[in-house]
Image: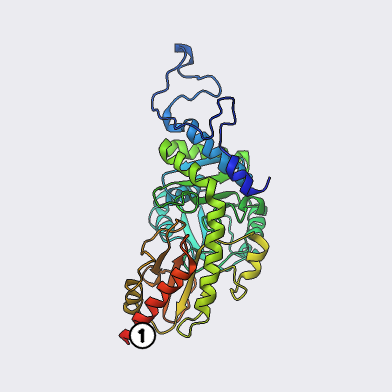
Amino acid sequence: MKDDTKLTRLGRPHDDRGQVNPSVARGSTMLAPSASALYDFPPGRKHYGRVGLETHDALRGALTELQGGAGCALTSSGLMANTLSILAATEAGGEVLAADCIYGPVRNFLTTQMSRYGVRTRFFAPQMGAEIGDLITDETQAILLESPGSLTMEMQDVPAIAKVARDKGVITIIDDTWSAGLTMKPLQLGVDYAVQALTKYVGGHSDLLMGAVVARDDALFQRLQTTERAFGFHTGPDDAYLALRGLRSMGVRMQRSAESSLTIAEWLAARAEVGAIRHPARSDHPDHALFKRDFSGACGLFAFEVPGWDIATSEHFLDALEVFGMGFSWGGYESLAIHCDPQLKRTKTAHKHDGALIRLSIGLEAPEDLIADLERGFMAVADRS
């Protein structure tokens, strides 16, 4: 089956009850069938609600099958999905190699928390491939990727890095929220842990916080699950149900957002005020060849540069928008715009752009209305000059 068909079927009961969607199973205490079974529950029977019930199983199974993995862990946010995979892959005395474009809160976790566990972090240039082998040492335990980076949109050569890492016994982790495990299949490219914020395209309606990690093989999943249960990570069944519901329409929502984003990017590229467009699906993106090779489609998240703008000008532009909202999430039905410069941080490579970097998350509105809104913002800046 194609993925669009799978999305309508994965994680559903398909039993003789005729129920289209799984029930929301809520519970903490699970009663043992006998005293002798209290510490040795029968196979397939849940012993405590924290490990998840039927609704969680349906979502985990759906995401595992969609990614082609061995098993899935659910977390209460995308950030926690990243931290879980890092904790599962490392131990004291080791190090993580991380792409310099990774999500800011994950960077903060690595630099402020993992050091407490005796794990150091080194950052590498965002556009990296097999040459990462030169950075791997005996202490390297994990490589953390984000391709494309969710602010600056640089890409790594994922299969090349995964191969080098596997040859050297290093675990690879990718934050794959941009593709939602749909338009790129990281595990099929050799990555060990595929992480995403289900908050974004899977949820799709800006009313859910959840993350997921899918493991490539059974040994990696066992390692992930052991860590998950040791830390007590848990998600609520109602949230799992919302994620399953969002999964059904994710394909068409992502396709619509991607198509609109390219229409809007083309309009922006023709404006005199705008510099580089940072959209991997455009042929002028420096990593477009990697996109064409590894992705079957895009999403609605991209950025553009505006030479000469300072933060005050960016804020004036954003404040003039009426259709775009301003918020730090993305992947929902509503379009969002932010200025990125206050949160950009690099330690390995200088981030090079002249002026401002504006990021857009394109939702499901008519692209004509979004273009008119951006025109309103540019006019407000021109009137201010």
Q: Judging from the image, what secondary structure is the residue with disc 1 in?
A: helix
Residue beneath the point at 54% across and 60% down: 256
- Residue 15 shown left or right of residue 94 in the figure: right
Q: Position of residue 377 (x, y in %)?
A: 37, 76
> Can I make out residue 232 in this image?
no
Residue sitting nearer the eye, 203 or 49: 203
Residue beneath the point at 58% across and 55% down: 138
Location of the C terminus by quadrant is bottom left
Residue sitting nearer the eye, 83 or 376: 376
Residue 108, compared with residue 374, is above or below; it is above
Residue sitting nearer the eye, 42 or 310: 310
- Residue 238 shown left or right of residue 281 in the figure: left
> Can I make out residue 138 in this image?
yes
Residue type at mark 1 is Ala
Q: Position of residue 49 (x, y in %)?
A: 42, 29
Residue beneath the point at 43% across and 46% down: 210
Q: Position of residue 25 (x, y in %)?
A: 44, 30
Outermost residue toward the bottom in this view = 385
Location of the N terminus by quadrant is top right
Residue beneath the point at 47% across and 57% down: 331
Residue 201, compared with residue 366, is above or below; it is above
How many marks can you see? 1
From the image, tell me which residue sits under label 1. 382
